[in-house]
Image (spheres, rainbow, N blue to C red):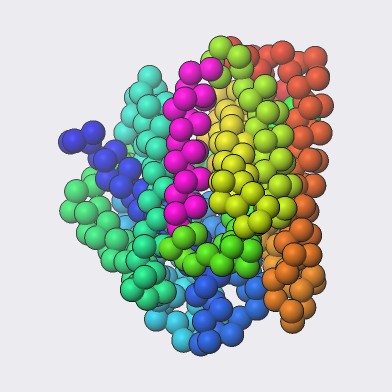
Amino acid sequence: MKRSPLLVIFITIFIDLVGFGIVIPILPFYVQDERFAASPSMVGLLFASYSLMQFLFTPVLGRLSDKYGRRPVLFWSIIGTGVGFLMMGAATTLWMLFAGRILDGITGGNISTAQAYIADVTKPEERAKGMGLVGAAFGLGFIFGPALGGVLSRWGIEVPLYFAAALSFLNATLLYFTLPESLDKNHPARTATRLGLTKMWGALAQSRLGLIVAIYFLLIVAFSMMTSSFALYTMYRFGFDAQQNGYIFTFIGIVAVGVQLLIVRRYVRRYGEMPFVVSGLWMLLAGLAAIPLVGPAQGGLVALLLAGGFVSVGNQLATPLLTSLASKSVGADVQGGTLGMMQSLGSLARFVGPLVQSFLIYSATAARGIDDHSLRVTFWTAAAITFAACLLAFYLRMRADATDYTGANLTATSGG
């Protein structure tokens, strides 16, 4: 990778995820600053606004990159991300905070453009290794982002946001001077038709792929409810500050990387995806159900890390393997469209989850703030959503054609 443009793409995705992770432990404390006097529900709405914009603008940025090239879209989207962080750091009113978060979400839809760049510059036999950079960048970004957010908050709650802005501008400078354009005027992306979209929706009509997508959506809704509620929970129940929450999320990220290295890479090819998807969903359900029962006198930090570990392992087993199953359930002609649809639906789910969380926190607490009842309502609702995903996964596994999910090449096509 030393001389490869993939190094720049890796850094781009990594910094995007560091920026996303930085706000997780600090946002609840940031919005509760006296300058904003925001309710707990605003935390969920801020998370939701980012994901909604990402859902809406990911396909827009993808189409712009097809028309004008990957390089300019990546460059200007990174600049926009930096400006969004600056706006959040300098915000003195709630609307300024939302404006910065919305701009960050709009420009944060560049992950699909980065993936398209990888597809442009890699040979088919090297494609999987190239796309593996995306997964590595996600995992590492989620480790370092919350840790940096927690540590830097010691010097001011807005310092992590200014740091993320500086990283973005440095990244844009690196990209401008080192990343070549991957598209020429004769590239197929320049002349692509809308036929692929029709085929992709035809593939979604398959009951098998439809079930996979439904499970994936419910899983991410539940997990995003956890991420937008967790800092509020630890602040209320354990008295943790942003730095301590950063350490907890770093632990969750380390567990996630360990799952990928020790379980997914070693055993999925041997046993197939479905057993791990089902196991992961049940682990996620157990962790979500247990979290509101944990406190300083109910298991303490050990129980908190154990429940968080269950959530992390469950999510890391199920989420990437559902994407793999979706890929294997369609023909080669609609691979890109199907995976793009999954990513877009993931962004939509990350909008729905915090939106539901903000409603539950508001309806359960009114003006009282966080309490034990609101925590149980929020986390157990996420657990109930996961339980629905578990039932769908169990049905999918019991289907006769579920025996195809063993890691072997499938023969399914976009026509079913």
Q: Give percent across and percent down for residue 231.
A: 57, 62
Of residues 238 and 56, which is closer to you in this image? 238
Indicate the quadrant where residue 84 lies: bottom left
User: Seen in the image, is 33 located left or right of residue 284?
Assistant: left
**Residue 111 percent coordinates (x, y):** 44, 48
Q: Magenta stretch: residue 254 in it?
A: yes
In this rendering, the answer to whether 152 lies above or below 391 is below
- Residue 258 visible in image: yes
Q: Quadrant of residue 359?
A: bottom right
Give left or right: position of 237 versus 161.
right
Q: Which residue is found at the position 61% from the left and 39% from the top?
A: 310
**Which range of residues does the magenta coloring cover?**
246-267
- Residue 284 falls within the magenta-colored stretch: no
Quadrant the C terminus occupies? top right
Q: At x 72% / y 41%, what residue is drawn?
A: 285
Q: Indicate left or right for 121 with 210 as reference.
A: left
Which residue shows up at 39% across the image and 44% down it? 140
Q: Position of residue 135 (x, y in %)?
A: 44, 37
Answer yes or no: is residue 52 visible.
no
Is 58 rendered above or below residue 114?
below
